[in-house]
Image (tube, grey):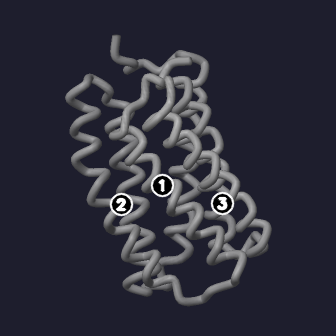
Amino acid sequence: MSLYAELGMALLLIDAVLVVNGLWLLGRGDDRDTAMLNLFVGAVAFVLAMWWAFGDSEGDPFNAAGTLLFAFTYLWVGVNAYQQRDDQRSLGWYCILVTAFTLPTGLLSLQTGDLGLAILWWAWGSLWAAFWILLAVERTDYTVPIAWYTIVIGIITAVAGYLMAIDLWLWTPT
């Protein structure tokens, strides 16, 4: 299976967790139900990252590292939601570190000719920056717009993941 097909399958799960997390931020989800999805998607992303780092795959340790940053986010959100933690400032500070990783990674994707993946990296980076504002800076007055932005990024991720999974991604390097 190609790297893009593997990534596409993962993105189909990631879009679900982003949409559910956005709805959860809007108060339309239970903490423990949301926790279960985050833990599941985080675990799947972790396994995929390990496959890319150590398995017989087209992936490499760099692909694995980027995936692990997001896998760890979902695992952390899952644990916090399950435990119904109110203080998530540390997670917020972690989110800004993820954002810092997405900026050059988008540029690297652009250099390989994958404009679509570059845009995704930057979109995810902007979302994780928004999570930093919400959680670390504690600007809860932005919860509703960040929730809707999370849903929008989830939908964009779904379309990208689907196109990658069915081998119709326009920017797949040859």
Identify residue type, mark 2. Val
CB within 8 Å, label 3 to label 1: no
Q: Residue at x 59, y 69 (%)?
A: 77
State the image quarter where residue 172 is shown. top left
State the image quarter where residue 47 is shown. top right
CB within 8 Å, label 3 to label 2: no
Residue 162 spot, x, y in % from top left? 60, 29
Comes first in the chain, label 3 or label 1: 3
Q: Residue furthest top?
A: 174
Q: Give the Cα distance between marks 1 and 2.
A: 8 Å
* Residue nearest the observer in this picture, 61 or 78: 61
Q: Give the Cα distance between marks 3 and 1.
A: 11 Å
Q: Residue at x 50, y 19 (%)?
A: 2
Q: Quadrant of the C terminus?
A: top left
Figure check: 124 above or below 118 = below
On screen, residue 88 versus residue 123, left or right, reads: right
Q: Residue at x 27, y 59 (%)?
A: 100
Identify residue type, mark 1. Phe
Q: Give the Cα distance between marks 3 and 2.
A: 17 Å
Q: Mark 2 sits on what residue?
A: 98
Q: Quadrant of the N terminus?
A: top right
Q: Mark 3 sits on what residue?
A: 38
- Callout 3: helix, strand or loop? helix
CB within 8 Å, label 1 to label 2: yes
Q: Mark 1 sits on what residue?
A: 70
Residue 156 spot, x, y in % from top left? 52, 42
